[in-house]
Amino acid sequence: MPSYAVIGASRGIGLEYVRQLAAKPDTIVFAVVRNASKSTHLQAVVKDAKNIHVVEADVADYPSLQRAAERVAEVTGGKLDYLIHSAARMEPGVHRGFDDYSSMDELDADFITSYKINALGVIHSISAFLPLLRAAPTKKIVVISTGEADPKFVRKSGTAHMTAYGMTKAAALIATTKYAVKLQDEGFVVVAVSPGLVDNSDTVGENGDPAGHALFEQLSDYYSKKLGVRVEVQTPEQSVSAQVKLIEGLKPSDNGLFLKHTGGEFVS
Ligand SMILES: NC(=O)c1ccc[n+]([C@@H]2O[C@H](COP(=O)([O-])OP(=O)(O)OC[C@H]3O[C@@H](n4cnc5c(N)ncnc54)[C@H](OP(=O)(O)O)[C@@H]3O)[C@@H](O)[C@H]2O)c1
């Protein structure tokens, strides 16, 4: 029975991973969220499933992840096949550029918060779950990344904003690569995956954000024009079903790669 822990599973891409993985036969899925009682979109998914365990942890709080790993170990007998890290700081301020702060102190504080969640958070989750991953035969770690972490993509797309997000996701990408190198001889496959442009508006807040759909269409037009290829907006269902297929097909030679959700290396 393959086991999956999805970190950042309350909404968006992480939630969709939980939904799709739990729908597969004979799986056990651990949905790791900051606040279970506030994760209303997840509750709706859990209600119809018997193989989803909700576990609380904040990726900026390492002891909470260690406790989460202990809870998972109790259920699985100390093993975990797949770790999927989706959590990231995506609140409205994610679009801020260098000049969108009232002072350098404000900028520093915001960047440090993002660093703790987006960069150190990846190290915290991998480190907390590593003993369980080592004990299982599968040994797969997937970290959800973004084109905004790639200097070439940033140059081509002309996105001078999303500064704290881009810088800290770039740090997470390097952390993922370092883990891939460190764990290679143990048979791990550790990859970063770009999910594409995914409209997560339906699970924003309690009731979704209908206005968000238009924003994603604008982003699609913007990126398509800048990159010279059509960048379609995807639903979480579309992006994650491609990602699940990708993850199922991961092979040792993929270790350390930054992949597109549809397969192949991310190149901008
Ligand atoms: N959507 C896109 O187009 C897109 C494109 C490229 C990359 N990505 C990447 O895809 C991933 C998921 O993004 P999304 O679009 O699904 O965003 P989202 O809907 O805003 O979901 C973000 C998730 O991260 C969780 N999270 C935030 N801070 C956390 C913390 N400190 N500890 C634990 N969980 C935390 C949130 O939980 P709470 O409910 O507790 O806040 C939520 O479940 C991110 O890594 C993002 O960088 C997304």
Image (cartoon, rainbow, N blue to C red):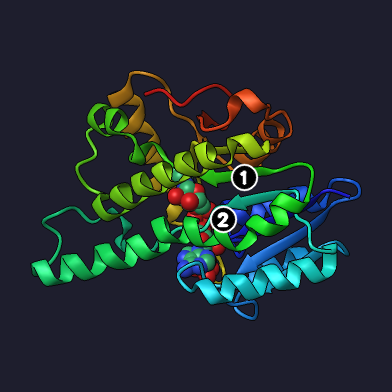
Q: Residue at x 31, y 47 (%)?
A: 166
Left or right: residue 94 versus residue 51 is left
Left or right: 206 in relation to 249: left
Q: Is residue 201 visible?
A: no
> Which mark, by number, is residue 229?
none
**At 64% from the left edge and 41% from the top edge, which residue is drawn?**
240
Amino acid type shown at disc 2: Ile
Assign a secondary structure to mark 2: helix
User: Going by the image, does 36 lie left or right of 216?
Assistant: right
| Residue that lies at the very extreme toward the front in this rendered image | 185
Secondary-structure class at tag 1: strand
Tell me the CA gap for discs 1 and 2: 8 Å
Residue 182, image x, y percentages: 52, 41
Locate residue 102 relative to residue 251 in the image: left or right: left
Which residue lies at the image location 34% right of the left edge and 40% below the top edge?
Answer: 148
Classed neighbour count for the residue bearing mark 1: other residues with Cα under 10 Å, few (<14), some (14–19), many (≥20): many
The residue sitting at the top extreme is 228
Q: Are marks 1 and 2 in contact (CB under 8 Å)?
A: yes
Q: Nearer the viewer, residue 213 or 6?
A: 6
Position of 70 relative to 246 (above/below): below
Would you place residue 70 above or below residue 148 in this image? Answer: below
Residue drawn at 37 percent across, 24 percent down: 268
Judging by the rendered image, the residue that carries numbered circle 1 is: 141
**Label 2: which residue?**
126
Give the x, y percent position of residue 184.
Answer: 59, 35
